[in-house]
Amino acid sequence: MVFRLGIDVGGTNTDAVVLDEENRLVAKAKTPTTPDVTSGIIRALDQVLASRTVQPEKIRYAMLGTTHCTNAIVERKSLTPTAVIRIGWPATVAVKPLTGWPEELVRLCGRYVYFVAGGHEFDGREIAPLDEKGVAQACKEIKGRVGAVAICSVFSPVNPAHELRAAEIVRQELGEVHVSLSHEIGSIGLLERENATVLNGAVWRVARQVADAFERALVERGIQARTYFGQNDGTLMSVEYAVRYPILTVACGPTNSIRGAAFLSGFGDAVVVDVGGTTTDVGVLARGFPRESSVAVEIGGVRTNFRMPDLISVGLGGGSIVRLQPGPGSSPTVGPDSVGYLLEQKALVFGGEILTATDVAVRLGMIELGDSSRVAWLDAATAEKIHGRIVSIIEDAVDRVKTSPDPVPVVVVGGGSVLIPDRLAGASQVVRPDHYEVANAFGAAIAQVSGQIERIFSLDRMTREEALAEAKRVARDEAVKAGADPACVEIVDVDDVPLAYLPGNATRIRVKAAGPLARHTSGWRR
Amino acid sequence: MRKLGAQEVEDIALGAAVLGTGGGGDPHIGKLMALQAIEEYGRVDLIDLDEVPDDALLMPLAMMGAPTVIVEKIPNGDEFPRVYHALRQFLGKEVYATMPIEAGGVNSMIPVASAARLGIPLVDADGMGRAFPELQMVTFHLGGIGATPMAMTDEKGNLLILSTVSNMWTEHLARSATVVMGGSAMIAIYPITGAQAKQWGIRGSVSKAEEIGRTLRLWSKQEGAIRTQAATLQRDAWSSRPEECAKADGAGPGDALQAILQLTGGYLLFRGKVVDVARRTVGGFARGEARLEGTDEFRGRSMCIQFQNENLIATCDGEVLATVPDLITVLDAETARPITTEGLRYGCRAVVVGIPCDPKWRTPAGLRTVGPRYFGYDVEYIPLEQRMAERSRW
């Protein structure tokens, strides 16, 4: 029997599960997220290992979904100075790299910026030959001054040749330096892709440290496992890959919840409501994956074009503070502020002084928790009214993400989901699967491996069908390269948008393929 | 005359997205170009049409091609002086000022960036009052004014001067050259006199975009207070400031919407949720239609928006409510931000707004150029105000 370990770091809690080959739960744990994150991960690990059902030597796979890289960017901590080489001159000069970045972030990691000639047109022709001397010259200037190099070439998603050649030159000149190539990180949209590429360089050491600390912790506990990081699209990457592309981990948390909810409930299409300590995320599960947002996503004040799960977050959770009369003559309010991870100290039922959403649920007998006599003073009618408010916040959020007026299954997960009743307006059924409180750790543990391609295809020499087939082939290859079982890779998403305002002949195709990890495919539910 | 700085540019860009009626290209990249040009070369003088002498030469500047290309292959910036000087020399006349040819979308910003670089004023007027996809779809065209001589260039330095027999020929030739140039080109087009601009231009469209943008910004600033707080909350449960929340509760997207309707003389056509978006490729143009199911006062009704880059026809329960050349704009119901046709997705909560176009488009020549039939719809053009009046009589 081989086990897999999944750990997911949330804003309030760090959750862990150990699953067997049939994806049955062997052990689970929930512990407060710590400011340094790593110690919370290790505590969660120790908690699941404390269970007698878990033999450390049986754990062969360890999946980690963590917020380290996001925190580093948001808190401006431990960032690596990163040089930017933009290939595209004479194009692109009208908007410089790092435009719109917060000053502090530029100062910490973006002081070396270079333009060199090169890049491609949308149909793959060269704008200009790559200025190889220009790349070498930039390397001489940054030698010893930066810990990473970000290379971004115009239309590299169509033709990455100049980025690849520039990377060779950088390695020749600077030796083993961390190199981020934009075509491996983002899609069409030069500035946003470049931003993500620079951030990728800036956080690679953070990822390296986390990976080392995690792997060391595993080894110290007698666990010999292959380690994977969860990424934004709900799939996995190896540690080597994660250190090369740490930026792809920044939104794995919400994704893990939705994927975990899908797995635990068995639904492929549903609305997922994840109630945490402070906020509730409501997202949509479409064919087993989160529906993605189409808007540019900001990370720490920097605009990127990552595809993130399309979520609505509302300020409602188990720790939400309830105010009975916030103003003269006004009705009770719930949140958006919360006692967060201090719930077990601050909530009334735990001996604290603050009325929280959890206290209301205890008063109404929805859960048994702490000392219920401490909330007996709250009259039932008021408690019902407050709970009605909670339900209407959730129902409104569910309605906002739905794609049609028809009732849909709603899967509720997360530690705070006890607040949600068994019936909701707009829901065909409300499903609260077993182990709902650690759904995100399940999401990490069961994640598949994916490959993706987004490219503009010129239809002069191929038909649209040929272009789609080519895109699907590349996406499958990418998934297999990342570790997926070739026999089980499936195309999970296809998007095809013609280029506007140009006569014919060019279309942007995006394809994603995903499959379970190679080996140990037996028992995988799909 | 007044100065346009960074704040004004931000507002114009946001307003231009509303006037872009779902197309015209995201003004974002143009805005960044304008901001960088203003930072490097100084603020731009915005002048009223009445300040322009009748015999002065005005030279509109714009980009043409695919917005998807410009967000990837950002211009160099030298393209603007290059087309400007080339056309100026060809005409042998000094240029008094530049102006936008298109008030909506990314071309609202190109002339701002150019004016800053060239140190010439920008005229508060344009030739569409919105966004349109082709070069002859300009009110100057209705006045018999030629699009040529025009100049076009790419970032590499290739430069063309076009002299054509009709504005349709200009469209065909320039469009082909744009593809060869790599999918986007910078153009100087429709050189006109002050007198012509006063007769055939659309006045005050830059200021109008700015006012729309400012309205949205001031509203979303209040809204931002809530979001910032929510973000803080996630980091530290104890740093909340409930009083800010209470303050921000006052305004809603409804207020921003009302203000925009007043500013533009527009109508609320629909409120609902996008339930289906069908796109298809016809000659490289992103055609399609979006279906919305009504919410609130529109519950039980449905709307269909047909688009070809821009939103062109809005139909509610089978009844046409608005058609091109009147403006049909879709705003996010939560943020009051405009949604482009490319950004329309299942589940978007949206309000659909109709805005009357400039009267010049409502003439027989105007409707031949940009009426519903030109875009291939067998629908009679009836002015938005008239459709709304007829509807309210029911």
Image: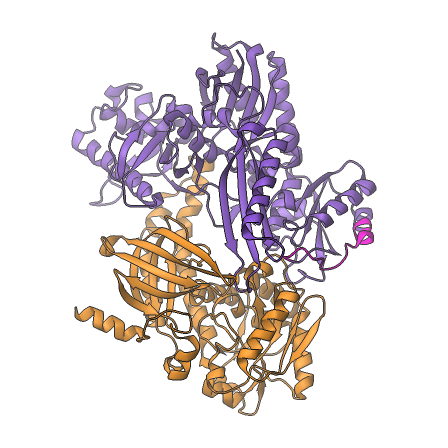
Chain colours: A purple, B orange
Residue at left offset 23%, top offset 23%: A365
Residue B101 spot, x, y in % from top left: 52, 76
Q: Residue furthest bottom?
A: B55
In the image, residue A41 lies at what x, y percent?
A: 53, 23
Residue B151 appears in view = yes
Towards the viewer: A317 or B237: A317
Q: Position of residue A395 (x, y in %)?
A: 28, 40
Please indicate whether residue B139 sits to the left or right of residue A450 in the image.
left
* Residue A523 higher or lower than B329, as above or below: above
The reply to whether residue A39 is in sight is no
In the displayed structure, B38 sits above or below A263; it is below
Q: Residue furthest top?
A: A52
Residue A161 location, x and y as percent?
72, 48
Mainly helix, strand or loop, the magenta region?
loop
- Hey, which quadrant is residue A471 in on the image? top right
Magenta residues, start to end:
A122-137
Question: In the image, is residue B48 part of the stretch drawn in magenta?
Answer: no
Residue B193 or A233: which is nearer the viewer?
A233
Q: Residue A131 lies in what quarter of the image?
A: bottom right
The quarter holding residue A506 reads bottom right
**Quick check: A218 left or right of A374?**
right
Q: Which of B158/B254 is in front?
A: B158
Image quarter hosting the C terminus of chain A: top left
Q: Is residue B47 above or below residue A514?
A: below
Relative height, residue A53 to residue A399 (above, below):
above
Number of callouts in the render?
0
